[in-house]
Amino acid sequence: MLNEALTPRQQRGMALAATAHIKRRSGMFEVPSATNSGASFIVAMVAGHFHCTCPDFELRNEACKHAYAVQYSLKFET
């Protein structure tokens, strides 16, 4: 994925992964909202795909910046 041009959502997810504290909770991830201080969204892997509780994912049913943030954080954690 990093060899291809990133979409705006992927870029925002990468920035969020670099700056936010993503918490693991019982096989899920709590990702802070980038726009609403104090709010967070839950990202979980379901049937091989990330699902998120944010309005963007619920509207589009496609990966959002929070899902990409989790994906990037997992890829680059040591």
Image (spheres, grey):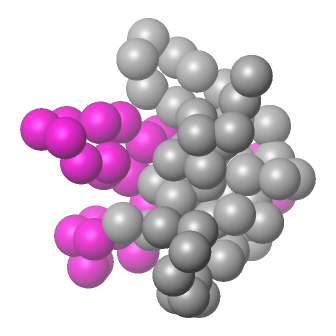
Residue lying farthest right? 19
Tell me what residue is drawn at x 43 percent, y 26 percent: 28
Against 5, residue 34 (above or below) is: above
Q: Is 38 contained in the magenta span?
A: yes
Where, by quadrant of the figure, is residue 6 drawn?
A: bottom right
Residue lying farthest top? 26
Q: Position of residue 44 (x, y in %)?
A: 35, 36
Residue lying farthest front? 3
Residue 34 visible to an observer of this rendering: yes
Q: Position of residue 48 (x, y in %)?
A: 19, 41
Tell me what residue is drawn at x 32 percent, y 48 percent: 50
Q: Position of residue 78 (x, y in %)?
A: 74, 22
Tell me what residue is drawn at x 43 percent, y 42 percent: 43
Residue 55 visible to an observer of this rendering: no
Residue in front for this viewpoint, 73 or 63: 73
Q: Is 31 contained in the magenta span?
A: no
Tell me what residue is drawn at x 58 percent, y 35 percent: 74
Left or right relative to 67: residue 53 = left
Residue in front for this viewpoint, 57 or 76: 76
Left or right relative to 33: residue 1 = left
In the image, the segment drawn in magenta is 37-62
Q: Position of residue 14 (x, y in %)?
A: 69, 63
